[in-house]
C-alpha cells in the first residue's frame, strides 16, 4: 500500500459565476521514502496539489489516501491531527512567527501534540544544533539570515517526526549558496527515511529529486514514476527521536499554558493598542466597583442613622385623616399612657411635649423649640451631652430653670468659640401657636445653660431642622405648659415581643379608651425594611448605569480582537499548518480577550481603590471600602466580558481555512 495515493482528484474554485479548475483528475501514488519533485509553471496547479497533499485544502472530488485513510472525508480537526502527526512544512517565505525565538518556532508543532515545555524545548535544541544553529537558539527571525530561517523551518518540520516533508519553493527566497545547502539538507533527510515532496518551477531544483512529476493546467503531463528497486524505509531514523505526544488531558494543560503565554506576548507586542483597549475595561470596572462601593458605604451610613432613629421605637400621634369631617382629635391623657406601660414588650414611653418660643441672649435672638425632657429623652432621641452636664435628680425635683442646648441653638445664640455653660438665656413664651384650646402665657423667664447635646454618632435628629433646647419636664409642666395631656408619644420596645404585635396591642387599647381610632402610628421596623428596599433598588440602578461604560469597553475589546485576527491571519495559518485544531485557535483568542479584560479589570480595581482612599482622606462622614468580594466580582465580570466579546473574533479566527490564511500577507 502506497503512503500517499490520489485517485481522480480535482479542485475547482468559484470566481463569481466562473468555475476555475486548479486540479483536474489527478491520480498518482507516492511510496514512503521517496524524493519527489512536483514541477510546473505558475498557474499549473502545483501549489494547489501541495495544499491537498498536505491536508491544508480539501479536493472538490476524488479520493486522497494517506496510509490507507481517506483524507478527503475528514473534518478540520482530523486533518489537523494528520498534519500534526505525519507532515512537516517548509515554506518559501519561511512562515516563522516573529515574536518567537528560533527554539520556540521549531518547538511549535509539539505544543499542539501536548508535549511539555521541557521535552519539546530539548527536542528543538537538538534539532537546531544538528542543523548548525546551536548558537542561534534565542534569536528571533528578524535576527537570522534567510538560510538560517529556512533551517529553523526544517527543524519545525521535523519536530513531531516529519514522516512526510512538503517543501514549497524552498530555495525561492535564498541565494545560490543557501539554496544549494537547502537541497543538500533535503537530500540528507530523504536518506534518513523521510518522504520529501518538493514543489518548484525550476527544472534545476527538480533535478535533485529521484522522481519528477510535471503539471500543466491542473493535469499531470509527465511522471517518471517511483524509481526501480525503491524500498520503503522500515523506520524513521533521526539524531533526536521524535517526541512522544501526550494524551488529551496533557494536551489541554499544555494548550492552556501556551495560550496564556501567547496572549501575554501578543499584548506586549502591541503595547499602545493594548493600553487603549484596557482603558475602556478599566474605566468600566472602576465605574462599577466605585459606584457599588460608594452606594454601599452611603447605604450603610444612611441605614445606620435611620435604624438608630427608628429601630426599637413606635411613634403615636393624635389625628387620623380617615375620620369623618368635624370629628375632634383627642389628646393622650396621663392615665392612658400609664396603662400602656404595663403591656408586654413595652420598655418605656416618652411623651412628646414641646413649645415653639423665642430665646434671647444679649443681642442675639432665635426661634427654638423647647422640649420637656426626662432622664431618658436624650437616649431616646439618639443624643449625647458633648459639653457640660445633663439634668440630675435635684433639677427634676426642684423644678430648676436649667436647660440643655443642641448645637444649632448654641450656634444661633452664642458667638463662635464662646462657652454657653453657665450663661443665662431668656425664653419668651407666647411666640408659638395655640396647642389645642391651650394658649401659652406670655412671659420671659431666665434659664441657665448647663449643657450642650449633639447627635450620637451622626444619627438623624428629631428636630426637623429647628433649633432645640431641653428643659426638665417638671419645670416645663409647672412654668411653661400646665396641661398634662400630650399630642404624641414614643413607645420604646424591649424586643421580648415582636414590634407588630406590640403595636396591635397598643392600638387595641387606645381604641377602647378613645372609642375610635383617632390617632396614627407606624411600625418603624417595617418602614425601615421598605427603606432598605428603596436604597437597594437605587444602588442597582446606579450600578447598571455604570455598567454601560463596561459594555462600551467590551465592544472596544471585540473590535480590537477582530483587528488582531485580521492582522494575524498568516500566524493562524501557520499554527493550523503545524497541527493546531480549530478549538486550539479559538481557545488562544478567547484567552487573549480574557487576559486583556482581566488586566483591564485589575487596573480598574486599583483605580477604584485609589479613588476610595482619596475620598476617605477628604471626608470622614462616609467610609468607602473596596472589599475582596468586589475584587472577585470585578475579575469575574472582566472574564465574562472577555468571554462574551471575545467569542466572535475567536470563532472567526478558528473558521479560517489554513490555505487561505497562509496566502494572506
Image (tube, grey):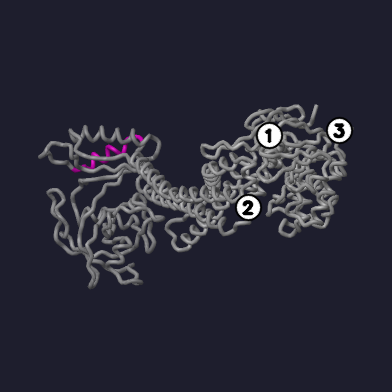
User: N-terminal of the two: label 2 or label 1?
Assistant: 1
User: N-terminal of the two: label 2 or label 3?
Assistant: 3
Specify few, some or many for label 1: CA neighbours under 10 Å numbering under 14, 14-19, or 20 or more: many
| Residue 537 on the magenta segment | no
Q: Is residue 337 left or right of residue 558?
A: left
Q: Which mark is nearer the camera, 2 or 3?
A: 3
Q: Quadrant of the N terminus?
A: top right
Residue annotated with mark 2: 266
Residue annotated with mark 1: 79
Q: Which is more toward the observer, 273 or 109? A: 109
| Residue 341 on the magenta segment | yes
User: N-terminal of the two: label 3 or label 1?
Assistant: 1
- What segment carries the magenta color? 331-344
The percent coordinates of residue 564 (x first, y second) are 57, 50
Dot 2 and dot 3 residues touching (CB under 8 Å): no
Q: Residue at x 24, y 57 (%)?
A: 369
* Disc number placed over residue 232 in the picture, else none: 3
The percent coordinates of residue 122 (x first, y second) are 81, 47
Amino acid at each position: 500500500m502506497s503512503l500517499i495515493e490520489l485517485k481522480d482528484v480535482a479542485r475547482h474554485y468559484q470566481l463569481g459565476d466562473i468555475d476555475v479548475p486548479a486540479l483536474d483528475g489527478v491520480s498518482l501514488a507516492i511510496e514512503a521514502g521517496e524524493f519527489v519533485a512536483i514541477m510546473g509553471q505558475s498557474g499549473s496547479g502545483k501549489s494547489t496539489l501541495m495544499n491537498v497533499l498536505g491536508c491544508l485544502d480539501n479536493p472538490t472530488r476524488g479520493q486522497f489516501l494517506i496510509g490507507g485513510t481517506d483524507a478527503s472525508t475528514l473534518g478540520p480537526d482530523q486533518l489537523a491531527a494528520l498534519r500534526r502527526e505525519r507532515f512537516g512544512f517548509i515554506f518559501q517565505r519561511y512562515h516563522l512567527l516573529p515574536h518567537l525565538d528560533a527554539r520556540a518556532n521549531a518547538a511549535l508543532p509539539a505544543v499542539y501534540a501536548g508535549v511539555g515545555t521541557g521535552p519539546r524545548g530539548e527536542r528543538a535544541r537538538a534539532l537546531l544544533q544538528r542543523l548548525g544553529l546551536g548558537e542561534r537558539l534565542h534569536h528571533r527571525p528578524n535576527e537570522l539570515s534567510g538560510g538560517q530561517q529556512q533551517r529553523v523551518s526544517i527543524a519545525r518540520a521535523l519536530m513531531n517526526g516529519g514522516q512526510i516533508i512538503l517543501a514549497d519553493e524552498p530555495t525561492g527566497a535564498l541565494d545560490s549558496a543557501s539554496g544549494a545547502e537547502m537541497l543538500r539538507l533535503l537530500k540528507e533527510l530523504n536518506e534518513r527515511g523521510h518522504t520529501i515532496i518538493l514543489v518548484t518551477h525550476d527544472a534545476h531544483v527538480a533535478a535533485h529529486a529521484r522522481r519528477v512529476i510535471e503539471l500543466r493546467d491542473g493535469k499531470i503531463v509527465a511522471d517518471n514514476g517511483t524509481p526501480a528497486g525503491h524500498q520503503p524505509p522500515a523506520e524513521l531514523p533521526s539524531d533526536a527521536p521524535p517526541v512522544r505526544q501526550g494524551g488529551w488531558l496533557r494536551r489541554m494543560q499544555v494548550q492552556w499554558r501556551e495560550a496564556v503565554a501567547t496572549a501575554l506576548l501578543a499584548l506586549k507586542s502591541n503595547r499602545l493598542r493594548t493600553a487603549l483597549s484596557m482603558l475602556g475595561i478599566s474605566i468600566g470596572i472602576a465605574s462599577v466597583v466605585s459606584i457599588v462601593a460608594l452606594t454601599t458605604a452611603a447605604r450603610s451610613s444612611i441605614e445606620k442613622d435611620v435604624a438608630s432613629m427608628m429601630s426599637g421605637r413606635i411613634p403615636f400621634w393624635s389625628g387620623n385623616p380617615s375620620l369623618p369631617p368635624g370629628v375632634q382629635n383627642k389628646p393622650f391623657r396621663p392615665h392612658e399612657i400609664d396603662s400602656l406601660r404595663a403591656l408586654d414588650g413595652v420598655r418605656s414611653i416618652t411623651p412628646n411635649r414641646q413649645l415653639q418660643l423665642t430665646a434671647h441672649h444679649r443681642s442675639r435672638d432665635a426661634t427654638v423649640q423647647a422640649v420637656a425632657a426626662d432622664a431618658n429623652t436624650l437616649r431616646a432621641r439618639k443624643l449625647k451631652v458633648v459639653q457640660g452636664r445633663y439634668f440630675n435628680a435635684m433639677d427634676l425635683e426642684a423644678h430648676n430653670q436649667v436647660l440643655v442646648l443642641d448645637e444649632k441653638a448654641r450656634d444661633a445664640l452664642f458667638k463662635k468659640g464662646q462657652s454657653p455653660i453657665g450663661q443665662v438665656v431668656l425664653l419668651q413664651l407666647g411666640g408659638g401657636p395655640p396647642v389645642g384650646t391651650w394658649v401659652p402665657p406670655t412671659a420671659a423667664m431666665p434659664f441657665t445653660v448647663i449643657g450642650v447635646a449633639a447627635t450620637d454618632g451622626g444619627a438623624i435628629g428629631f428636630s426637623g431642622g429647628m433649633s432645640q433646647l431641653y428643659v426638665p419636664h417638671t419645670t416645663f409642666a409647672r412654668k411653661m405648659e400646665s396641661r398634662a395631656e400630650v399630642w404624641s408619644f414614643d413607645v420604646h420596645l424591649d424586643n421580648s415581643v415582636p414590634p407588630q404585635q406590640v403595636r396591635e396591642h397598643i392600638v387595641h387599647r387606645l381604641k377602647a379608651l378613645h372609642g375610635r381610632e383617632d390617632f396614627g402610628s407606624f411600625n418603624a421596623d417595617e418602614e425601615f425594611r421598605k427603606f432598605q428596599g428603596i436604597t437597594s433598588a437605587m444602588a442597582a440602578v446606579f450600578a447598571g448605569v455604570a455598567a454601560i461604560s463596561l459594555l462600551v469597553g467590551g465592544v472596544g475589546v471585540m473590535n480590537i480582537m477582530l483587528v488582531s485576527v485580521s492582522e494575524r491571519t498568516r500566524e493562524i495559518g501557520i499554527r493550523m499548518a503545524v497541527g493546531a485544531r480549530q478549538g486550539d485557535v479559538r481557545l488562544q483568542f478567547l484567552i487573549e480577550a480574557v487576559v486583556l479584560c482581566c488586566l483591564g479589570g485589575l487596573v480598574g480595581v486599583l483605580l477604584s481603590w485609589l479613588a476610595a482612599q482619596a475620598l476617605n482622606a477628604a471626608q470622614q462622614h462616609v467610609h468607602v471600602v473596596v472589599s475582596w468580594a468586589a475584587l472577585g466580582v470585578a475579575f469575574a465580570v472582566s472574564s465574562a466580558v472577555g468571554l462574551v466579546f471575545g467569542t466572535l473574533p475567536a470563532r472567526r479566527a478558528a473558521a479560517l481555512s489554513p490555505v487561505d490564511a497562509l496566502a494572506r500577507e
